Image (cartoon, grey):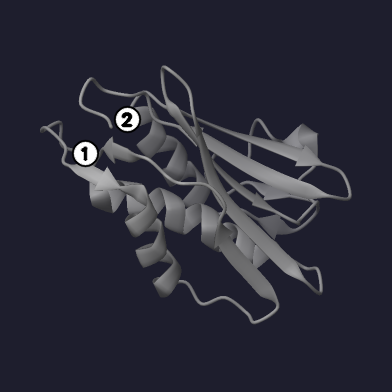
Amino acid sequence: SKIGLTKQPSINTNTLVESVLQKIESPTHITISIVTELPHIFADEHLLAKVFEVLIQHAVDHIHNKIGLIEIGCESTEKEPVFSIKYNYLRIHPTHHKNIFEEFQIIESSESIGVGLNIVKKITAHYNGKISIKSIPNKETIFYFSLPKTTDDV
């Protein structure tokens, strides 16, 4: 589908993420928390919600530990806020980091990624942002995405 180029409203990403979390069904062994204050940014609310929904749901679906932990945060630089979704899942090997955002990728023998991460890549690219992944073996996986600040961002 096409993404409009009209002036975007200011979005309180704390409120947006809390709304997304209410829609996600998470098992009782997984704790999801917002660990930093999230900024106000100018973006399409539905598109930004989709980014958070896909990344958080991906984490929920792929935590295989007895105790799951998902932490959502943001670190702002002069140029952009950099959001992170960190969780204790460790099966995404660094050799898969480049192609994980392509449609219907299969990683680790039979685990399919589908189209969700590809949609996130397309939305962040629309805003001239970036998405990346970092895995620390036997510890965690972190998805990072950034959306460049506009002169209107708070």
Q: Check disc 1: other Cα within 10 Å, few if <14, some if 14-19, many if 20+.
A: few
Say which of 38 and 122 sits in front: 38
Question: Is 10 in front, or is 43?
Answer: 10
User: Which residue corresponds to the image point at 20% horizontal and 26% vertical from the top-left?
Assistant: 152
Q: What label does residue 3 carry, if any?
A: 1
Indicate the quadrant where residue 7 lies. top left
Identify which residue, 92 or 45, lies in the foreground.
45
The image shows residue 112 at horizontal and vertical percentages of 65, 56
CA gap, disc 1 and disc 2: 8 Å
The disc labelled 2 sits on which kind of residue?
His
Position of 128 with respect to 86 (left or right) is left
Is there a contact, CB below 8 Å, between mark 1 and mark 2?
yes
**Is the residue 84 above or below the residue 98 in the image?**
below
Amino acid type, label 1: Ile
* Residue nearest the observer in this picture, 25 or 117: 25
Q: Which residue is mark 2?
A: 126
- Residue at 42% x, 17% y is 78
Badge count: 2
Compared across the picture, whether 55 is left or right of 67 comes to left
Can residue 115 be seen by looking at this rendering?
A: no
Residue 14 lies, in percent from the top left, at 38, 53
Quadrant of the rendered image containing residue 122 = top left
Residue 11 in the figure: left or right of residue 124:
left
